[in-house]
Amino acid sequence: MKRVLLLSFICIFSLTGAVAQKGIAASMKRLMNDKIFTEGDASVVIYDLTADESLFKHRSRKVVRPASVMKVLTTVVALDTLGFEHTMKTTLSESAAEGGYNLYVRGEMDPLFGEQDMIDMAAAVPAGSVVDTLYADCSFSDSIYWGPGWSWDDNPYAYQPYLSPLMLCGGAVEVVVTPSDEGCPPEYTCTPESSFYTVVNEAECGNPDLGKLTILRDWLVDSNVIRISGNCTKVSKEELNMYKSADFFLAVLVEKLDSMGVEVKNVAFGKTPQHTNPIHIASRPILDVVEEALLESNNLCAESLLYHVAASVSSAPASMERGCKVVGAFVKEKLGYESGYNISDGSGLSLYNYVTADMFMSLLRYLYSNPDMYSIVYERLPLSGVKGTLKNRTKGTAAYKKVRAKTGTVKAVSTLVGYATGKNGHTYAFVLLNNGNMRSRDMRVWQDKVLEAICR
C-alpha cells in the first residue's frame, strides 16, 4: 500500500512539473513575440529549482550587459569569501606628540558611515583637547576613485561617488530646495552641513522664463560649488557627490570636533602608526551593507564589498582590479565558466561588464544550494510590489509578493534576476536580460508579464 501511495505521489509530482513546464513554455512562446522585440532582444533562462529542471531558454549564451544585477554576483562572492560576520571599521586612534597628541582616523570604505557616526566619533575626544595634527589614513585602498568604464557624465551624481576609504554619507550631500514667495529665491537645506562646499542660489520662484530648476555641482572644473538655478515651482531634491570624498570626511570631522570644544591645529594625510591607542571604532556589519546593495541598489555598498574581497586576499592596498580577479576566480571555480564574460566592477556601473544568462542562472542555482547564504540574500532582495526597487511593480498580478529579485537599469538595458514562487508551491529561478530597447518602461512591463506567467 505504501509503495502504491509513493508511486502515486511521484506520478502526481511529475505531472505537476510537466504541466508547469508546458505552461511556462507556452506562455514564453507568446511573450517572445512581443512588439518590444522589433527593436531589442532578451536573454532568458527559467529554471524550476524544486523539480531541478530547466523550463525555458532563449539566447542564454549571448554576451550582454548586466547593469545592477552585477550586485548579486558581488554579494555572493563577498559572503562566500568574507563570511557572514565580517565588519567594516572606521577607527579613531591617538598617539603622543610633542606638546600634545595626534589623532588618526583610518577608514575601510564603510559605505553607510553617516552623520551620527561622525558625531559619535567626535564625542570620543575629550572636550577642551588640543590636537596637534589630525591624520586621515587612506591606506586601505588604492587612490583610483572610479571604476573602468564608468561614464564621465554620471559625475556629479551621488550614485557614482568618488571612492575612498573614508566615506561620509556616501561621499555625497543631499540638497532639498523648497519654494518660497513668488519673485523670491527658494529656500534650501543641505545635509550634512559643512563649509567644505559652497551653495550659490540663483533660482527664483514663479518665473518660468528661467527654465527648469537645476541643482548641480560645478563638476567640470572639479569644484565643490553647488549651484541652484532656474524656476522653482515645487520641492526638489538632488544628491550630489563631493569631489575628493576623503577630504570631505576630514573637513566635517574637524568641524564636529570644533563644535565640541576640540581644537585641531593641523590636518594631513598619513598612515596610522603601529602603536596608537584606539579611542573609537565604528563597526559596520557586512549584512547591513548587503541589504543596502541589493534592496536599494546602492552602488557604493557593492563597490565596498568588492574592495573588502580584494583586501582579504592581499596585504597590499585593496583595488577594484584585484577584487574583480577574485570574482573571476569564483566564476571559474564555483560556477564552471572560464570565458564568455567580463567583470569590471562590483556595482554594474561599468560599460565593460558583460555576462550571459546561463552564467547568472548558475549563480542563482549555486546560491540556492547553499541554504544559509540563500536565506541571507533572499530576505534582502527587493520584494515585488512591497519594497526595494520592485516596490512599484507587479501589483494586482499573480506575481504580487511572490518575487524576490534584483533589478538593473542603464540606457537601453533592463535586467532582472532572482526567485519566484509558483502557484504550485515550486521555487523558480529566472534570468531576464533585456538589451536594446530605448524605453526602460517597455522592458519592465515585459518582464512583469514573464513573472506573472511563472507565478501563475
Image (cartoon, grey):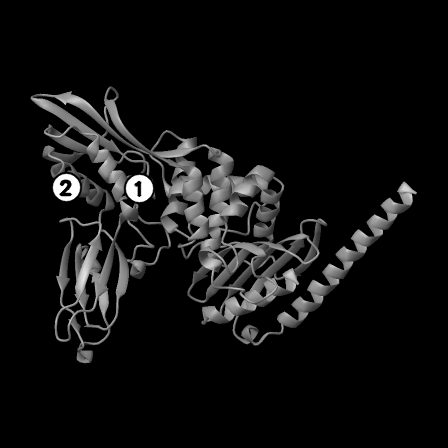
Q: From this viewpoint, is residue 336 visible?
A: no
Task: Where is residue 59? Give x, y as percent.
Answer: 61, 62
Location of the C terminus (image quadrant): bottom right
When asked about the image quadrant of residue 239, the answer is bottom left
Q: Compared to 176, does 49 lie above or below? A: above
Check residue 113 in the rendering and tell me which mark sits there, or answer none. 1
Q: Amino acid at mark 2?
A: Glu
Q: Secondary structure at mark 2?
A: helix
Task: Where is residue 143? Give x, y as percent.
Answer: 28, 41
Check residue 255 in the rendering and tell me which mark sits there, or answer none. 2
Task: Where is residue 362? Give x, y as percent.
Answer: 60, 48
Q: How many discs appear?
A: 2
Q: Amino acid at mark 1?
A: Phe
Task: Where is residue 51? Give x, y as percent.
Answer: 72, 50
Sequence-wise, the earlier of marks 1 and 2 is 1
What is the C-alpha distance between the residues marked 1 and 2?
A: 16 Å
Residue occupying the point 76% across, 61% down: 19
Check residue 347 in the rendering and tell me which mark sits there, or answer none. none
Residue occupying the point 77% across, 58% down: 18
Location of the N terminus (image quadrant): top right
**Mark 1 Cα shell of 10 Å, populated few (<14), some (14-19), many (≥20):** many
Along the viewing direction, whichever of 147 and 91 lies nearer the viewer: 91
Q: Secondary structure at mark 1?
A: loop
Furthest-right residue in this view: 1
Furthest-bottom residue in this view: 209
When asked about the image quadrant of residue 281, the answer is top left
Q: Is residue 398 left or right of residue 259?
A: right
